[in-house]
Amino acid sequence: MSWVLAFVGFASLIILHEVGHFVAAKAVGMRVERFALFFPPLLLRKQIGETEYAIGALPLGGYVKITGMNPEEDLADDVKARAYFAQPAWKRIVVIAAGPAVNIVLAMVMLWGFYAFIGPTELTNRVERVTPDTPAAGVLKSGDRVLAVDGKRGDFEVIARAIASHKCAGEPVAGCRAADPAELLVERGGEQRTISVRPVYDARAERTLLGFRPGERRVVDGPAEAVGSTFDRTRFFAVETLKLPARVLDAEDRKEISGVVGSYEVTRQVIIFDFPLVLQVLALISLSLGLINLLPVLPFDGGHIALAGLEKLMGRRRSLLVMERTVVIGIVLGAGLFLLGLTNDINRLMGEGFGPPP
């Protein structure tokens, strides 16, 4: 079921992207030959008026086929006036920019809804669960509230840092106990008590821990404050997405790039473990889809926008040869990113996996 929901989420983002192109093309009077979800071979097709609606077999995207996208295409006289390259540059820019614009606006709407009505989770000082065979076992109980450690009060981050400040004697090894105990002020059943316990070093976390899982709560901004959070997160996600070319050049960062399979899997696991968070995940994917499509090389949307803009500035159309060379660059770039992401996804699936959300 989670795979189905993840697929529906991805398909919806693709459909809405193409709907942006489709509606804009119709609005400015262009002739749309086909509106397709996914790439050929086509599995289903239905002709309605002058437009064919289709579903392809390869779930790698979608497309809107507008008459006259090739400037040297031989067209019948009755459709030539409505062809893409027969339109002024501003109309072509509007049509091409509409797809990414839908994704970017949709991402912001989803983020606003998330922060206004759902909210991200934050860790609390309440003990959710005690891990057996750890220093916390037999000392802490589910429902306890850790008010302070060594007299330091604050949120869970403050508490965790205070616990981690207790080090093992000498070089830390897995399972070693801290040299000195941590003094915990704990509230249980309305009463406060002081508990002395020595944390243990966890090699995976690379710090000392007590061995309990903190509780969580959602922090909801409300409709007004969510506007600020939406712009903050949109700016953050946009900057991270625009760092993609630099990440490709860095050997370590390159390993973290995820592809279609990884995005599907992350979405699926979020659906299983923290369904409300799926809205934020889909917002990130939608924003990335919109921004990546604005890369100024063909066949990305940004390439078409750049060509139309250059034509407007220079007063003449680029030759088909220039367009074909740009398309080759774009295809190589797109295929390279796809294969890199797919390779990383396969390595994760064969290794440690993507792991559930923390």
Image (cartoon, grey):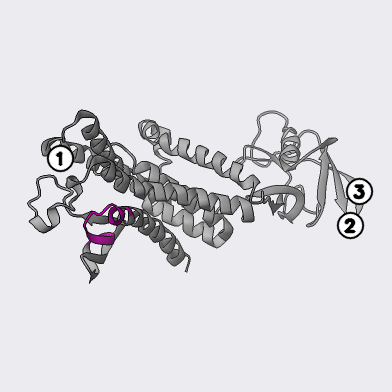
Disc 3: CA contacts within 10 A as few (<14), some (14-19) or many (>=20): some
Q: Amino acid at mark 1?
A: Glu
Q: Residue at x 70, y 51 (%)?
A: 213
Residue 202 in picture, x, y percent from top left:
65, 41
Q: Which mark is residue 180?
A: none
Q: Mark 3 highlights which residue?
A: 192
Q: Residues within 10 Å of mark 2 (few under 14, many from 20)?
A: few
Q: Is residue 307 left or right of residue 343?
A: left
The crowding category of the residue bearing disc 1, from other C-alpha atoms within 10 Å (few below 14, some 14 to 19, many at least 20), is few
Vertical placement of residue 324 versus 273, above or below = above
Q: Which residues are magenta?
A: 24-40
Q: For numbered disc 2, what is the local secondary structure?
A: loop
Residue drawn 20% across the image and 41% down it: 327
Judging depth in this view, the residue of 270 and 162 nearest the camera is 270
**Between marks 2 and 1 in the image, the one whose residue lies nearer the viewer:** 1
Considering depth in this image, is 17 or 131 the residue closer to the camera?
17
Identify the residue at horizontal 91%, vertical 47% (top origin).
193
Sequence-wise, which precedes: disc 1 or disc 3?
3
Residue 28 belongs to magenta span:
yes
Membership of 312 in magenta stretch:
no
- Amino acid carrying label 2: it is Gly
Residue beneath disc 2: 189
